[in-house]
Image (tube, grey):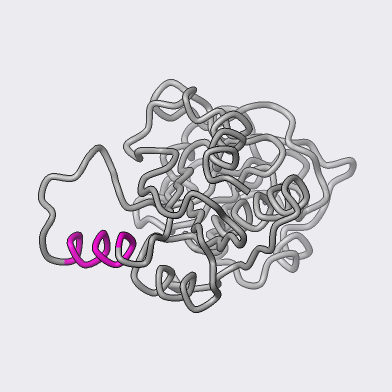
Amino acid sequence: MELAEIVKFLDEYLQIGNYQDVSNNGLQVEGKREVEKIAFAVDACMESFRGAIMANADMLVVHHGLIWGGIGYIRGIVKKRIEFLLNNNLSLYAAHLPLDAHREVGNNATILRKIGVEPQEEFGEYKGVKIGYTAELDEPASVSEIAKKFESAMILPFGKEKVEKVAAVSGKGCFALNEAIDEGVELFITGEPEHEAYHLAKEGGINVFFLGHYESEKLGVLSLMEVVKEKFGLETVFLDIPTNL
């Protein structure tokens, strides 16, 4: 399969042109023209690059790419990373906000599906675009039962024990906590814990789950991998490289 065809599909499917993002979304590093196997990972790092080569992949698709607003200097770690990609002819594709926000395979839509609901209203405005979703449960569910849907979650139990309205903004999503309080969300699910969220959640009377930045954002990568596998019939592999953060 030609690299250009895969890139065209990803660009259009993820609608990467619709987002003002610090990430340079799309094909960041061009490698082999023909692609037989694609690796997927959360982060563009030497560990994922080496893992892709060991898996005999020709392309690596990540959520957190290598180029954020351009490259100032090609030296040190940046030089080593780019040198490795070019020497191994490995293509690197990144999708940051587009993969957070996507209604079908996005991190936030997938988080909500894990608790048994479909994403409904757009939520969590970032740079003029809403990248998360809210949803209403069919019937109230206990916070403790919902927590069991995730491998691990740090919980701020400052709201009702049984909730109906939930919202998800993955990664560093605490910027949307005030919005969640204002909109009557009873359970807010995000990734990275932030100190200032504690008192805000307590005073706002809302439950908050912190899944961890990595854990909240590998979900969309896994979902996108299945779409690409089905679309192109190519071999795929997920490189699980948790940061525990």
Q: Position of residue 29 (x, y in %)?
A: 36, 49
> Is residue 82 rendered to the left or right of residue 139?
left
Of the pair 212 and 107, the residue shown nearer to us? 107
Q: Quadrant of residue 38?
A: bottom right
Which residue is found at the position 44% from the left and 57% from the top?
192
Stretch in magenta: 77-86
Of the pair 163 and 105, the residue shown nearer to us? 105
Q: Quadrant of residue 175?
A: top left
**What residue occupies the far right of the structure in this picture?**
138
Chief secondary structure of the magenta portion: helix
Quadrant of image for the C terminus: bottom left
Q: Is residue 80 magenta?
A: yes
Which residue is found at the position 59% from the left and 42% from the top?
6
Q: Position of residue 200 (x, y in %)?
A: 43, 45
Q: Position of residue 178 (x, y in %)?
A: 47, 35
Of the pair 183 and 237, the residue shown nearer to us? 237
Tally of numbered discs: 0
Q: Is residue 58 magenta?
A: no
- Above or below, 4 against 214 in this view is above
- Above or below, 234 against 151 in this view is above
> Is residue 214 rendered to the left or right of residue 149?
left
> Is residue 104 rendered to the left or right of residue 9?
right
Which residue is found at the position 74% from the left and 30% from the top?
120
Of the pair 54 and 244, the residue shown nearer to us? 54
